Amino acid sequence: MTTVLAFGTYNARKHPRVGILIEGLRRNGCTVEEVNHPLELSTAQRVEILRKPWKLFGFGWQLIGLWRQLKRDAKRWMTVNGKPDAVLVGYMGHFDVLLARHVFQGVPIVLDHLIFAGDTAKDRGAKGLKVRLLNQLDHVATHAAGLVVVDTLEHQRMLEKDVQSMVVPVGASDEWYAAARHVESTERNGIVFFGLYTPLQGTPVIAEALVELARRGITPRVTMIGNGQDYAQVRDITRNLGTVEFREWVEPECLPDMVASHIVALGIFSTTPKGLHVVPNKVYQSMAAGCVVVTGDTAPQRRMLGGGAELVEPGNPMALADAVEALLTDDGAMSAVRQESIAVAQRFKAETVSRNLAAWIRNS
């Protein structure tokens, strides 16, 4: 039996990607155990550390304490079990992978590398030396692993040629598929967005589209979940709309059923380079929950989703308004897209997206 040790300060509750990989590897015949001490930082805080590595010192004592526990527990685990066949370093493991390489010498290390520090910093307005330093952090982290897992072909092309890599779609966890079963289609109504209000998301585009829909007399229930740097701008654009409910936070355990209570889910509409490289978690999650997804017409989303989503020109609020209007005013079109979406979503279950990774680990 192939044994994989998931290792690091990842937080699977807040960032489900690593949990999907763990469950998928198990369903593909691997034994997966965990040595995990979560670093209790939000996504925004972790990204801020990647943008400004000197802020790491502000969390230094916490991180050092967690690394001591990780090192101690890993050595204790190997004393009982021997070395694992592979180590999986979870999402945002730029620093954890360096510890893993030190602790698990001679063991293949898999780094789940969904976020490029330099690319993320540029997406949020950084330039010059800061970006070059963060690109160097990406270089060091990716070269510390035996296999780097990315989510799209576009991200794979950003890696240096000497880095062994594999594209593994993000996928969706079981809770999202269960949410689709919990909510009957007749109970679904309205539009939902969830995520960080960052340039990647294109939330001002969403806000302007909602205003345009209202001008046309189309005023569905809208739930906007999240916060971030564009939040105030979105609130300002939609200030005269009475149909938009803003929620800054929803507990992860409650989010799938809440999203599934809506008929349309919105993806990303950014025109930034980063926005053109990704298929975000929420697109897979929303499809699994049985929603009709409307998102940007980018190469990775077109490739991954095919006819399972309505694709619109990124950065274009009129195109987004047109697509939403067409769906909300034509039950036949809504039903056809939803049925295709449900079919496509089956390709992104944990066991399917992890199949090639399990094969690589068994053969490494």
Image (tube, rainbow, N blue to C red):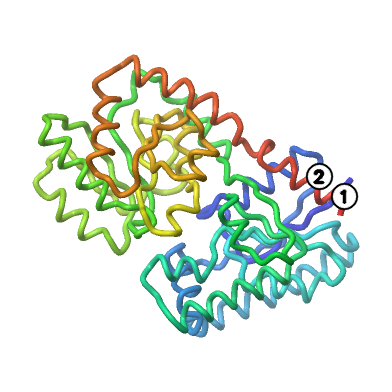
Q: Position of residue 305 (x, y in %)?
A: 51, 35
Q: Residue at x 50, y 55 (%)?
A: 14
Q: How many discs appear?
A: 2
In the displayed structure image, the side of residue 184 where residue 189 appears, left or right? left
Q: Residues within 10 Å of mark 2 (few under 14, many from 20)?
A: some
Residue 12 location in percent, x, y? 58, 54
Residue 35 position within the rendered picture, expressed as x and y whole percent measured from the top left = 72, 62
**From this viewpoint, is residue 5 visible?**
yes
Real-space Cα distance between discs 1 and 2? 6 Å
The image quarter containing residue 352 is top right
Quarter holding the C terminus? bottom right
Q: Secondary structure at mark 1?
A: helix
Q: Could you tell me which quadrant the N terminus lies in?
A: top right
Image x and y of residue 6, in percent: 72, 58
Dot 1: within a 10 Å radius of its alpha carbon, few (fewer than 14), some, or many (20 or more) residues? Answer: few
The part of the image, by quadrant, that contains residue 101 is bottom right
Q: At label 2, which amino acid type do we have?
A: Ala
- Looking at the rendering, which quadrant does residue 95 occupy? bottom right
Residue 258 visible in rendering: no
Q: What's the residue at 17%, 35% (across, down)?
A: 213
Instruction: Write down the residue under mark 2.
Output: 359
Q: Is residue 216 above or below residue 239?
A: above
Q: Are marks 1 and 2 in contact (CB under 8 Å)?
A: yes
Residue farthest to the top, as pictured: 332
Circle 2: element type: helix
Residue under pointer 1: 363
Residue at 53% across, 31% down: 177
The residue under the point 34% across, 47% down is: 314
Q: Amino acid at mark 1?
A: Asn
